[in-house]
Amino acid sequence: MTISWPPFIDPESGISQYQVCITTVPGNCTVTDFIDVSLNTSFTVYGLHLVHGESYYAVIKGINGIGMSSEATTNRVLIDLTSPTLKDTDNVPINTTQAPPSSNNSVSHGIELPTDVIQGSSHIRFRCSEELLSANWDEFKDQESQLERYEWCVGTSKAQCDVMSLRSVGVKPKGAAIVKRLPSGTVLFATVYAVNGAGVRPV
């Protein structure tokens, strides 16, 4: 866990050192003891065995030239090791990619692309008309750190973004983009990533 903080100020005797500890209870040290970090204002604590679903805090102690100290506690850090899942379906991967159900899934100006098929279920609806690409998808959820955003892109093969680069649409389960007109017959794939508050997204 890496902690950074602004310098403490003591106009009289100055700051002589900082100490940090990790805790599950604000204002106390329950995971590590205080660690002397000299005058550094950033420090990484290694060897922690953090538990999924548990909240942690860092306590920073500033000590002045005559040994007096004050402390500051960071905001809560929630450990979330799991990916978002579809609201109505469990154990579906965080990323879903349009898989063409037939050879007719190609760019044809003014013709709607067939519905995506994912694991026998339709989670992404992807359309192309002229230079406009649009998609909407089923919503995801994350019980631990909540859903942070969706990202989507379009490419000529699965999970590739060579037609439209990856872009965020916030928490709206839909996106649209204007791209250069592609040759008729080009097969397109739309990929959607759900990212949670811990930043977990697929590699």
Image (spheres, helix red, strand yellow):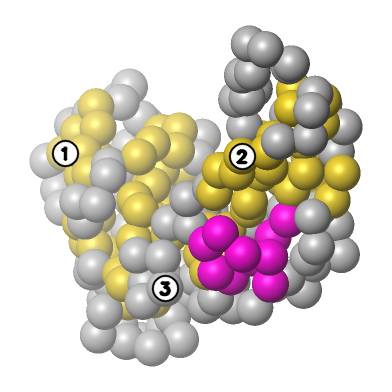
196 or 62: nearer the viewer: 62
8 or 88: nearer the viewer: 8
Residue at 38 percent across and 88 percent down: it is: 90
Q: Which amino acid type is marked by label 3?
A: Glu
Q: Residue furthest top?
A: 11
Q: Which residue is mark 1?
A: 129
The relative height of residue 86 versus residue 131 in the rendered view (above or below) is: below
Residue at 58 percent across and 70 percent down: it is: 24
Q: Which amino acid type is marked by label 1?
A: Ser
What distance separates the C-alpha of mark 2 from that of mark 3?
32 Å
Q: Where in the figure is residue 172, as x and y percent of width and height?
A: 19, 51
Q: Which amino acid type is marked by label 2?
A: Ser
Please indicate whether residue 79 sits to the left or right of residue 188 in the image: right
Q: Which residue is mark 3?
A: 144
Q: Quadrant of residue 71?
A: top right
For residue 26: magenta? yes
Q: Where in the figure is residue 176, as x and y percent of width and height?
A: 21, 38
The answer to the question of whether label 1 and label 3 lie on touching residues, with beta carbons closer than 8 A, is: no
Question: Local crowd at mark 2 within 10 Å, few (<14), some, or many (≥20)?
Answer: few
Magenta residues (range): 21-30
